[in-house]
Amino acid sequence: MVCKHIFIDDIVYVANLTHSINMSMINIMKRRKVMFSKLKNLRQKLSKSKSGFIDKIAEAVKLRGVVDEELFEQIEEILIKNDTGTEMAELILTSLREEVRIDKITDPELVQIYLVDIMQNILFKDIPDENDFFEIPEDAKPFVVAFVGVNGTGKTTTIGKVANVFAKTGKKVLIVAGDTFRAAAIEQIAIWAERANVQILRTEANKDPASVIYDGVAKGVREQFDVVLIDTAGRQHTKDRLMKELGKIDRSIKKACPQAPHETILVVDSTTGQNAISQALHFDEAIKLTGIALTKFDGTAKGGIIFNIKQNLEIPVRLLGIGESIDDIENFHTVRFVRAFFAGGEEAEEE
C-alpha cells in the first residue's frame, strides 16, 4: 500500500512538473513573439532614417567599386552629413582605414561590412544598465519625471505618449501643466491627457510655473499617484534667465517630494543635428539630466545623431519617438536599436 501511494505521488509530481515546463515554454514563446514584433515595428519605423544613412553608404560603396582614398572620403562625407559629428566621423574613418590596411581588404563590399561592424561596436561600448523606463522603482511613489527642452522638439507629444504607456499598465498618472507662459500650451497638454485618459493639474496662463509644479507634485504625493509627469515651458538654451528658472523648478519639486525628480528628461528633436549636443550641455548645467528622449526619428532624422550623442555626452538616450501615433514611443535599447537600424534585407526576411 505504501509503494502504491509513492507511485501515485510520483505520477502527480511528474504531471505537475510537465505542466509547469509546458507553461514556461508557452510564456517564453509569447515573450519571443512580442520581442520580434517590437523589433519588426522598430525596423519599419526606422526605415526612412536608415535609407538616408546606411543605405547611402551602401550605394556609395557599390558605385565606387574600388577601395581607395576617394571611397573613404565619400564615406566620411556621408557620416558628417548625417549628423555623426566631425569628431565621431574621424574616429570611425581612422578605425576603418586601419582595419582595411591590416587585413589588406580590396573588396568594397567588405569595407562596408567592416564599417558597420565598427559603428555597431561604438554603440555597444560601455553600454549603461538599460533599465526599462516604464518600470517604476518600488521606493518611488509617486514616480516624478520632469521634461525639459527647447520649443518645437515634441516635448508635449512625448509626455502624452509616456502617460499613455503608464496608464495602459494600470498606473494612476497625473500630468502637471507647468508651461504656464502660453495658454495654447496648457490646452495642448490637456488634449494629450484626455487622449491618454489620465488626470491633469492645470491653471490659467501666466501663473508662476514653479508654484504650479509644486502644487502638482504635492497633489501627486497627497493623492497617492503612481506617476507624475511635469511639462515645463520650452526655452532657448542660450537664454540664461530662462535656464536659471529651471533651478527654481527643481527646488520646488524637491520641496514637495525630496527624492524627486526621479528622472529629468531632455526632449531633443533628432533632426537638429549638432545643435542637440549644445542643448544637452546647457540644460544639464541648469538641471541635472538623467536621460534624453529623441523625437522624430522615424522621418527626416539622419540617424547619425545617435553616434554624436555617444561621443559627446554622458547622458543616455532613454526614449525614442518613432511616429505620430500615441503608441509610437519606445524604450531606447541599444541591442534592439542596432538590430533594427543595421539589419540587411536578408536578416529582415529571416525574422
Image (cartoon, rainbow, N blue to C red):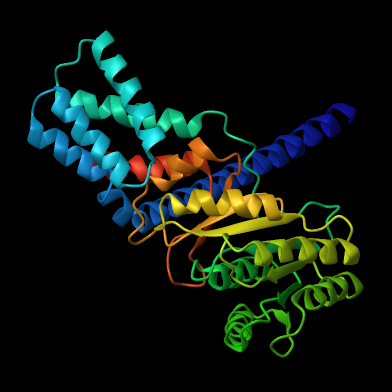
Q: Is residue 257 left or right of residue 345?
A: right
Q: Quadrant of residue 286?
A: bottom right
Q: Looking at this rendering, what residue extends furthest in the front direction?
A: 240
Q: Quadrant of the N terminus?
A: top right
Q: Quadrant of residue 77?
A: top left
**119 and 162: which is toward the camera:** 119
Placement of 76 over or under 277, stated as above or below: above
At horizontal 64% and vertical 70% (from top left) the residue drawn is 163
Q: Position of residue 289 (x, y in %)?
A: 67, 51
**100 and 281: which is toward the camera:** 281
Q: Position of residue 215 (x, y in %)?
A: 84, 77
At horizontal 85% and vertical 34% (from top left) the residue drawn is 5
**303 and 163: which is toward the camera:** 303
At horizontal 35% and vertical 34% (from top left) the residue drawn is 89
Placement of 120 over or under 321, stated as above or below: above
Can residue 99 be seen? yes
Placement of 154 over or under 139, stated as above or below: below
Q: Looking at this rendering, what residue extends furthest in the bottom direction?
A: 204
Q: Is residue 218 left or right of residue 351?
A: right
**70 and 335: which is toward the camera:** 70
Q: Position of residue 136 (x, y in %)?
A: 75, 55
Can residue 289 be seen? no
At horizontal 79% and vertical 30% (from top left) the residue drawn is 7
